[in-house]
Amino acid sequence: MDIFKKHSVSLSISLVLHLSIFALFGLSFVSEPDVVKNKPLPEIIRASMLDEDKIQAEANRLKNEQKNKKWRQNKKQKALENKRKKEQKLLKEAKKKRLKEEKKAKESAKKRKALAKKELQKLEKIKKQNALESARLAKINKQKVAEKKRLDDLRKAEELKQQELLAKQKAEDDAVLAKQQQDEQATISAETAIRRKVISRWINPQRLVKGLNCTIRVKLLPSGDVMSVSIIRSSGDTFFDRSAENAVHKASPLPVPKDRALFTKSFRTFNFEFRPEELLKP
């Protein structure tokens, strides 16, 4: 500020000179633009301008320095204020945290106490459940023993039943086998008897060719009476075939089994191989 007071006159003179120069410069620029543009400034004016620039630069420097000093003081003050606020905030947060931890500790103690009580109740409940489960398992084991005995009895009864069924089936199979053997024997006996009776009634034609034979189909009544006779395979000799048919008719009734089922199965209609030479063999 003292520098400004000391050089105030110089600054005023310099300002007036500058205004005058600018006015002259403006007029010259209007009338003779090219000449004014190339004409150098007077030395006095240039010196005044340089002094003014230095003064202005010094004034700006002092002003900036003052401004920077104030800015640094404000910054320092602000930093101290921020630090104080931060410390207060940290203290407040620490207090809040301590109160929160105390509250949490009380709640934890309360929870532990409630949990211990609940755990004790749970243990009592488990103990009671275990007692009930033991009783249930004992009952189940008793039922299992009874069920095992029942199943064993059923198995034994089933085995006995199966043995009886097998014995019955074996007896039936044996009976069926015996019946089959009996029927086979009766069939063979009846067939042999029929052949012998038929051959006994057969009249040998005089012109018989040795070795002739034929197949005859015979239909009978249950009494053995012949209903019909037909040649299904000829011997090739008409007289021989006719003599065979006549022999069957003359032998009626044929000796058939008395068993009606066997008769129906094997002798109601049957094929008869007529071989006189074979049947006449002793």
Image (cartoon, rainbow, N blue to C red):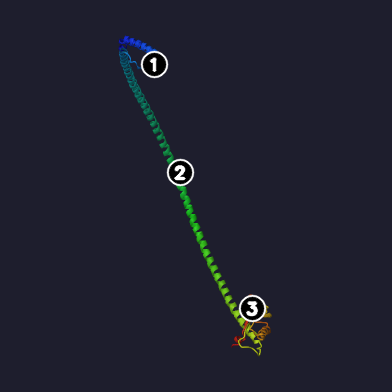
- Secondary element type, mark 2: helix
- The x and y percentages for residue 224 are 67, 80
Which residue occupies 46% across, 49% down?
133
Q: Is residue 128 left or right of residue 65?
A: right
Residue 191 visible in this rendered orientation of the protein? yes
For the residue marked with disc 1, what is the amino acid? Pro
Return the mark for residue 125. 2
Q: Which mark is residue 270?
A: 3
Looking at the rendered structure, the kind of residue marked 2 is Lys
Disc 3 marks a residue whose amino acid type is Phe
Mark 2 or mark 3, which is nearer to you?
Answer: 3
Label number found at residue 188: none
Residues under labels 2 and 3: Cα distance? 91 Å
Q: Locate residue 38, reporting x and y percent.
A: 35, 17
Determine the residue positioned at 36% across, 11% down. 20
Nearer mark to the viewer, of 1 and 2:
1
In the rendering, which numbered label is found on residue 33? 1
Q: Which corner quadrant holds the N terminus?
A: top left
